[in-house]
């Protein structure tokens, strides 16, 4: 069980060290879908490289 745990921990470390994460703001316009009006808003788009 300990071996599996440490294997999992090392896999998570490798995954976290690969590349970088960037957040890009995206402007969403006002839109109406099925009679529901959504207000304009800004969402963050996450890009992992």
Image: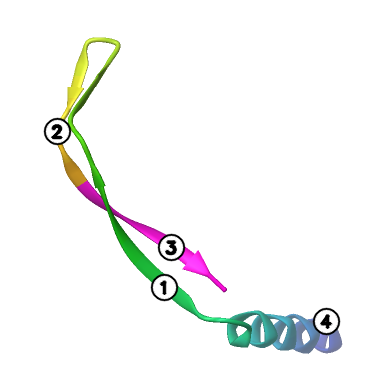
Render colour scheme: rainbow
Q: Which residue is mark 3?
A: 46
Query: Toward the viewer: 36 or 23?
Result: 23
Residue 8, percent across and down? Answer: 74, 80
Residue at x-position 36% and y-position 68%:
23
**Magenta segment includes 46:** yes
How many C-alpha atoms fall within 10 Å of the one at disc 2: few (<14), some, or many (≥20)? Answer: few
Measure the C-alpha gap from mark 1 to mark 4.
31 Å
Specify start and end residues of the magenta stretch as a single range.
42-49
Look at the image and say whether residue 48 sits in the magenta stretch: yes
Residue 45 horizontal side relative to residue 38, left or right? right
Label 3 Cα neighbours within 10 Å, binned few <14 / some 14-19 / many ≥20: few
- Mark 1–mark 2 Cα distance, whole angstroms, equals 25 Å
What residue is shown with label 2? 39
Looking at the magenta stretch, what is its main secondary structure?
A: strand
Residue 21 left/right relative to 11: left
Screen quadrant of the N terminus = bottom right
Q: Position of residue 47 (x, y in %)?
A: 48, 65
Determine the secondary structure under disc 3.
strand
Q: Compared with residue 33, is residue 9 higher up or lower down, i.e. above or below?
A: below
Which residue is labeled 4 in the image? 4
User: Where is residue 21 shown, x and y percent of the image?
Assistant: 47, 75
Residue at image coords 34%, 64%: 24
Which residue lies under the disc numbered 1? Answer: 22
Q: Are marks 1 and 2 in contact (CB under 8 Å)?
A: no
Badge nearest the viewer, 1 or 4: 1
Answer yes or no: do the residues labelled 3 and 4 have beta carbons within 8 Å? no
Q: Dot 1 lies on which element? A: strand
């Amino acid at each position: 069980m300990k071996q599996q745990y440490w294997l999992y921990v090392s896999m998570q470390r490798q995954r976290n060290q690969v590349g970088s994460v960037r957040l890009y703001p995206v402007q969403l316009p006002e839109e109406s879908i099925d009679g529901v009006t959504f207000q304009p808003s800004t969402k963050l788009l996450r890009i992992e490289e």
